[in-house]
Image (cartoon, rainbow, N blue to C red):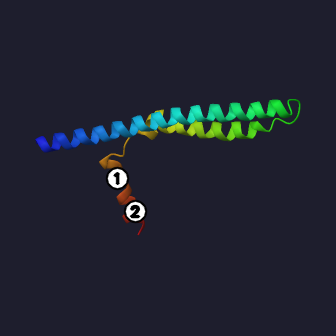
Amino acid sequence: MATNESASESALRALAVKSLKKKRDAREFLIVTIVVNAILVGVWWLTTPTGYFWPMWVLFGMGIGVMFAYIDAYVRPFAQPMSEQDIEIEIAKITKSR
């Protein structure tokens, strides 16, 4: 019984570490995005402030990346681990299609 509890505790600890890593990575990516985009907007402003706003493409692309990083880290359905029932259902689907 003690080994089951320690195994479940270590599994919970591993899930918590993984969740915290995702959250930290999302924050770091947000900071990198802000810095890179600020530099690009600065370059645009210094070179052609009345011309075509080309940094919008980088802002848009990196913004999508930040959005997906935060969804992965903070939205519950994506952050929950797979249960044994989920695994058994998937195995049944695979064996049924053969």
> Most extreme residue toward the left, as rendered?
1
Direction from residue 42 to residue 6 in the image, left or right: left
Q: Residue at x 75, y 36 (%)?
A: 56
Given residues 81 and 55, the one toward you in this image is 55
Identify which amino acid the numbered label 2 is placed on: Ile
Q: Residue at x 67, y 41 (%)?
A: 61
Dot 2 corresponds to which residue?
94
Can you give x and y, in whole percent of width and height, for residue 17 in the image? 35, 38
Given residues 80 and 51, the one toward you in this image is 51
- At label 2, counting other C-alpha atoms closer than 10 Å, the crowd grade (few under 14, some 14-19, many 20 or more) is few
Can you give x and y, in whole percent of width and height, for residue 55 in the image? 76, 37
Give the spatial CA distance, label 1 vs label 2: 11 Å
Viewport quadrant of the N terminus? top left
Q: Is residue 75 visible?
A: no
Q: Is residue 66 visible?
A: yes
Quadrant hosting residue 41: top right
Can you give x and y, in whole percent of width and height, for residue 84 in the image? 30, 49
Provide the secondary structure element on which disc 2 rests: helix
Dot 1 corresponds to which residue?
87
Provide the secondary structure element on which disc 1 rests: helix
Identify which amino acid the numbered label 1 is placed on: Ile
Can you give x and y, in whole percent of width and height, for residue 32 in the image? 59, 35
- At label 1, counting other C-alpha atoms closer than 10 Å, the crowd grade (few under 14, some 14-19, many 20 or more) is few
The answer to whether the residue labelled 1 contacts the one labelled 2, judged by CB atoms less than 8 Å apart, is: no
Q: Residue at x 24, y 41 (%)?
A: 10
Quadrant hosting residue 3: top left
Direction from residue 89 to residue 29 in the image, left or right: right
